[in-house]
Image (cartoon, helix red, strand yellow):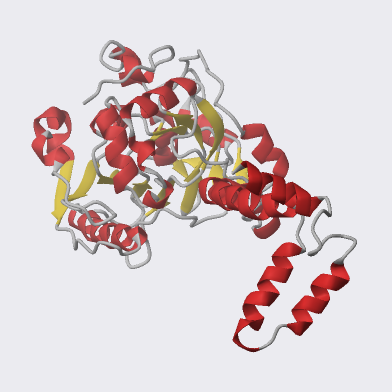
């Protein structure tokens, strides 16, 4: 081995008559002299002889390391350079949100540029359900005073095509308080493994359209379109049901929380929306359907689960399953550590459109110790929902 190293150094320092800086012509002559079947091998030998030690190190050590780094962090690299290949969507027209418990509804509607109705619209709240029992409970208690019909659809299949239990059906007794106003549906999964998860998601949302009609919705009723973890404040819904001339489709900007109400990431959650229902036109969707948005309308609590097992289930079940790039991402100890730090479960770069915003959001989410203006049921039952409040990051194993 030592002789091999000495020989390598000798070649690098020009101690060999082959391919040294002083004898490149000899190497060239040898390459030219070779012919026949051995010519290709000779050319390779001459090329290798012409490389110094630093070049060999670069080829056999650094290049594999670079390839490995791209494999491990390729997604980060792609997202970091997103401003170069992607453009931000058209900005929303922001509607300021006015509210105080002691201000009359007539004045609140007027502040928004709307008139007051003689009687409120009916409100329908429709969701696709997976396994978010705690957030569903908080959501329905928050909206209960002003929602006429709760609509829930669940499937025995995840968006990724794997079987799942009917969680709501088996815990239905927990929601007796909404039973008189509940329209429940179950749709069997297609179990198309390997298919784009968004196809199954669209299939289930289409089925939810039929369930909404079955619930008895009529033109000009309000229909809430949002995921279970996108919880609208009750005063927002009360405002929209009492005010006239609101937009036919209105997006709602929510405060974005991660893991609990301790980690406030931003105020940019926008997918939740409220629609004045129109037969034959309104379709249940979770993408942009309007250019108008009402700010500060509620809370989006993403991955806000009681148990580690629920985190693992969602990571494997929801439409962005491609983000689970390595098995270690599903390690319970790692997940618990990530939750308490406020880091990203998928070790991803922030999904933003400018380098300034990406850099500003890199790293862990700062802790917030404010529990002001959170859903009422959460605070009234704080002992049961301690895991969602500041200073309580430890989760049950499940």
Front residue of 343/190: it is 343
- Name which residue lies at 66% across and 59% down: 85
Give the answer, above or below, for where 368 lies relative to 97: above
Residue 15 visible at all = yes
Image side of residue 176 versus residue 368, left or right: left
Image quadrant of residue 387? top left
Front residue of 27/267: it is 27
Image side of residue 89 versus residue 303, left or right: right
Front residue of 26/336: it is 26
| Image coords of residue 398 (percent x, y) | 21, 26
Front residue of 115/122: it is 122
| Image coords of residue 396 (percent x, y) | 26, 20
Residue 145 visible at all = no
Image side of residue 42 versus residue 208, left or right: right
- Name which residue lies at 31% across and 28% down: 332
- Name which residue lies at 29% across and 28% down: 308
Q: Quadrant of the N terminus?
A: top right
Give the answer, above or below, for where 246 lies relative to 383: below
- Name which residue lies at 52% across and 51% down: 71
Give the answer, above or below, for where 204 lies relative to 145: below
């Amino acid at each position: 081995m030592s002789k091999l190293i000495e020989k390598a150094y000798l070649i690098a320092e020009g101690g060999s008559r082959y391919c040294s800086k002083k004898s490149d012509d000899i190497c060239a002559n040898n390459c030219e002299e070779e012919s026949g079947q051995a010519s290709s091998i000779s050319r390779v030998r001459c090329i290798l002889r012409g490389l110094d030690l630093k070049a060999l190190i670069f080829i056999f050590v650094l290049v594999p390391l670079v390839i490995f780094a791209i494999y491990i962090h390729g997604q980060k690299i792609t997202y970091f350079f997103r401003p170069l290949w992607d453009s931000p969507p058209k900005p929303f027209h922001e509607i300021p949100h006015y509210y105080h418990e002691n201000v009359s509804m007539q004045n609140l509607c007027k502040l928004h540029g709307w008139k007051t109705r003689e009687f409120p619209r009916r409100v329908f709240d429709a969701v696709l359900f997976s396994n978010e029992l705690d957030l569903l409970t908080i959501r329905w208690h928050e909206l209960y005073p002003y929602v006429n019909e709760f609509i829930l659809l669940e499937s025995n299949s995840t968006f990724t095509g794997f079987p799942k239990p009917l969680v709501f059906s088996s815990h239905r007794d927990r929601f007796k308080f909404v039973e008189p106003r509940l329209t429940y549906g179950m749709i069997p999964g297609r179990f198309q493994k390997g298919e784009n998860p968004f196809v199954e998601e669209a299939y289930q949302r289409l089925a939810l359209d039929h369930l909404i009609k079955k619930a008895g919705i009529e033109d000009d009723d309000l229909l809430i379109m949002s995921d279970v973890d996108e919880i609208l404040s009750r005063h927002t819904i009360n405002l929209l049901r009492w005010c006239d001339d609101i937009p036919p489709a209105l997006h709602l900007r929510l405060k974005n929380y991660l893991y609990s109400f301790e980690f406030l990431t931003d105020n940019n959650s926008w997918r939740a929306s409220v629609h004045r229902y129109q037969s034959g036109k309104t379709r249940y969707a979770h993408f942009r359907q309007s250019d108008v948005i009402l700010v500060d309308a509620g809370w989006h609590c993403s991955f806000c689960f009681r148990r580690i097992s629920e985190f693992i289930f969602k990571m494997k079940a929801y439409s962005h399953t491609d983000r689970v790039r390595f098995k270690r991402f599903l390690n319970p100890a790692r997940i618990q550590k990530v939750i308490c730090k406020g880091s990203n479960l998928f070790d991803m770069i922030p999904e933003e459109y400018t380098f300034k915003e990406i850099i500003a959001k890199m790293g862990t989410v700062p802790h917030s110790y404010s529990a002001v203006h959170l859903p009422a049921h959460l605070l009234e039952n704080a002992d049961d929902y301690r895991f969602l409040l500041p200073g309580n990051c430890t989760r049950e194993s499940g």
